[in-house]
Amino acid sequence: MSATQLTVRRLLIDLSTPFARHWNGGDAFRTAWFNALSMSFPLGEQFFIDSVRAGLALLPDTERARFGSEVRGFIGQEATHRRIHALFNAQLARQGHVNAWEARIRHRIERLEGAHPRHVVAITAATEHFTAILAEHLLTHPQVLDGAEPRLCTLWLWHAAEESEHRATAFDLYRALGGNERWRRRWFLLVSWHFLTDALRQTVRNLDHDGALWRVSTWRSAARFFCGRHGLLRHTFGPWCGYWSGRFHPLRRGGEAGMKWLKGNTGQYASLP
């Protein structure tokens, strides 16, 4: 792998001003889904930061020098995501939402105490593939943000573009640490299960708090979101399956939509040194 240069960017939006309860085009389900994802990010992003930092420290000097710049860029991007989603989540807390997903993440992190850093890097690589395919779907099917508040639309597309940009960092680090295919696949299966079930559980909790859980319109929206023409399941199942191949590498597909968004929206962020 040749090192990827990752730019750390500061998003130029204001999250101190409250946003609407159904900020995503007035749609209760789409709003609840994105709110749920955001609830996982601050603690999850910190885990990614800690895992790649620990993995980098185990590399021989020559490998550490090769990965150092990219890992620093990865950490900078993830730290920025952590900060801005903490601000987003603070607004959700003011609306009365309870973040139950974060407690489950914290519990799983505690159970990993003492594990070899190679395993936590494998978990990070697996989760990064999951977020990368979600990001690619969002960037290529932005209809799921139709009618969203412009500043929040920018937030999600910027985050998706950067997830796409650094999608290979943890994967390549895992390989450099001597990680094998069996554990790479095993962790991906477990991550897939936890990510999907936790996202759905938190979405249902958000809808229940919102009073929209039992509305027919909510579940019509959910059906369109997952199975419609631009449905998440229809367009991400293939990329999800790709991770099982021994020839898989994150950079072999996708990424163009993220680069296009970053190039076309330079006024929305400031690049940091």
Image (tube, helix red, strand yellow):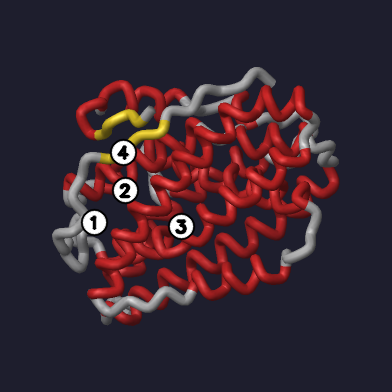
Q: Callout 3: few (<14), some (14-19), or many (20+) C-alpha neighbours within 10 Å?
A: many
Q: CA distance from mark 3 to mark 4?
A: 17 Å
- Residue at the image position 63 percent from the left and 56 percent from the top: 192
Tell whether label 4 touches label 3 (CB within 8 Å): no
Q: Depth check: 128 or 50 in front?
A: 50
Q: CA distance from mark 2 to mark 1?
A: 8 Å
Inspect the image, locate mark 2, and give the three-letter code of the amino acid beneath it: Val
Inspect the image, locate mark 3, and give the three-letter code of the amino acid beneath it: Phe
The quarter of the picture where the N terminus appears is top right
Q: Quadrant of residue 217?
A: bottom left
Q: Nearer the viewer, mark 2 or mark 4?
A: 4
Q: Nearer the viewer, mark 3 or mark 1?
A: 3
Q: CA distance from mark 3 to mark 1?
A: 19 Å
N-terminal-most mark, 2 or 4: 4
Give residue 211's position: percent from left, percent from top: 27, 81
Q: CA distance from mark 4 to mark 1?
A: 23 Å
Inspect the image, locate mark 4, and give the three-letter code of the amino acid beneath it: Arg
Q: Which residue is mark 2?
A: 144
Q: Which residue is mark 4?
A: 10
Q: Is residue 36 visible?
A: yes
Q: Nearer the viewer, mark 4 or mark 1?
A: 4
Q: Check the image and report above or below for 205 versus 123.
A: below
Labelled disc at residue 24: 1
Q: Give the side of residue 197 with respect to residue 121, left or right.
A: left
Q: Give the side of residue 189 with respect to residue 127, left or right.
A: right
- How many numbered marks are there? 4
Give residue 60's position: percent from left, percent from top: 80, 30
